[in-house]
Image (cartoon, rainbow, N blue to C red):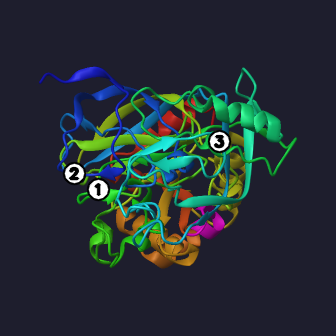
Amino acid sequence: MEAKQTIYVNEFTNGILDPSAEMIGPLKDGGHIIANTAPGCWGPMITPSLRGGHEVTKPVFVEGAEVGDAIAIRIKSIQVTSMATSSGNDRPLDGRFIGDPYVAVKCPGCDTLYPETKIEGTGSEAIRCANCGEDVAPFEFTNGYTMAFDSNRTIGVTVDEAAANYIASEGRDFMATPENSVQNPIVTFAPSDLVGTMARLRPFLGQLGTTPSRPFPDSHNAGDFGQFLIDSPHDYGMSKEELEERTDGHMDINRVREGAVLICPVKVPGGGIYIGDMHAMQGNGEIAGHTADVSGIVNLQAKIIKGLAIDGPILLPVAEDLPYLAKPFTTKEMQAAKRLAGLYGVAKLEESFPLSFIGTGANLNDATDNGLQRAADTLGLSVPEVMNRATITGSVEIGRNPGVVTVTFLVPTHLLDELDLTDLITNHYEASGE
């Protein structure tokens, strides 16, 4: 099939990222992906037929992408289409799953695994097994809210019980759920523990990445949530060593937003770019475990970087999202540094640009170690040198609690030259005004 310059995506997986499954495409190198994405966590979490905790787009095959390459994905635009959503902190319900409530839901009434469901009314008991009629949702809210958005998608306000029930009665419409999505809208639960709370919208993609080299439940394609797969009794259990085949597409890093560039590893032929779990807003850490899941329209551009063998993603944030110490130096700062260097006989100053290496692990300490090691391996530096550079020219920031971080620091340009990244990074920050 001839590769296309633009591919439109409105199909979704069943929650499993399977490298043997057919991909959409092929897409030309440098081409665009336009996708209508489905909401992430909570809707799929109350839809037992989905097996991964999310409902991401079917992966796109990029022509010419080979194992050992990387793909730079530029986020051209993100537009929220939902008018409202619900979210909050979760509690799994015993007796309704095998090993993992995100992956293997079992009906407590008839023991059907991955049961189809129907919606009867509203509230936390509205999701019913299509086979026996039993309440089958494997999660409930410990504290939840329903939030409505203004027409410009700039402000959200949490609503009271009456408004939450009204939104719940027309759930798919309020959430603008894509036609091919099978998830139950989480607004059906109509939570209203927070009322009158205002929030600013700044949408980003909680899921953006490439397909792992073995089947993974989509929400577990990360070093923290992936821990639940180790020796798990369901069909997608794996060993600690097999977990290393992940690509860390599920990051929930709020800096993966419009204008950013994410460089992803290619671990299967064609890369297999997938998208999902758009959030309306989130503070660092996603500390509640969930945030405001929304539908949306995404425009991405994908460019292959040949021979850049990386284990996990590298982020080029929007300039304003960079840590203060990692911002590119201004002309005035460079002049001051040259004068100071001259006083002490330093003949040449480093030229540098910022990079954010994604690290994931069972906890934040392990994630930090992972990010430091990935940076060292990619750049050919020692871990202690990366530690020093991240301390004085960058920062370690939480992406998601319990175990996703970004290790950001200024990287010498000569190292970027060796990786064929200098032009990409220079163009990115020149376009950002830095």
Residue 351 rendering spot, x and y as whole percentages: 52, 51
Above or below, comparing residue 233 to residue 343 in the picture: below
Q: Are marks 2 and 1 in contact (CB under 8 Å)?
A: yes
Marks 2 and 3: which is nearer the front?
3
Give x and y (percent) for residue 241: 28, 76
Q: What is the crowding at mark 3: few (fewer than 14 residues within 10 Å), some, or many (at least 20)?
A: some
- Quadrant of the frame with the C terminus: top right
Disc 1, SS: loop
Mark 2 element type: loop
Magenta segment boundaries in residue numbering? 390-402
Q: CA distance from mark 2 to mark 3?
A: 37 Å
Foreground of the two, 121 or 43: 121
- Circle nearer the N terminus (2, 3): 2
Dot label at residue 267: none
Residue located at (65% from left, 32% from top): 169
Residue at the disc numbered 1: 212
Instruction: Say what amino acid the circle numbered 1 marks.
Output: Pro
Vertical relation: 253 (above or below) 38: below
Front residue of 353/26: it is 26
Q: Quadrant of the N terminus?
A: top left
Q: Is residue 148 visible?
A: yes
Q: For the residue labelled by badge 3, is the local secondary structure a helix, a strand or a loop? A: loop
Q: Which residue is mark 2?
A: 19
> In the rendered structure, which amino acid carries the disc numbered 2?
Pro
Residue underneath mark 3: 122
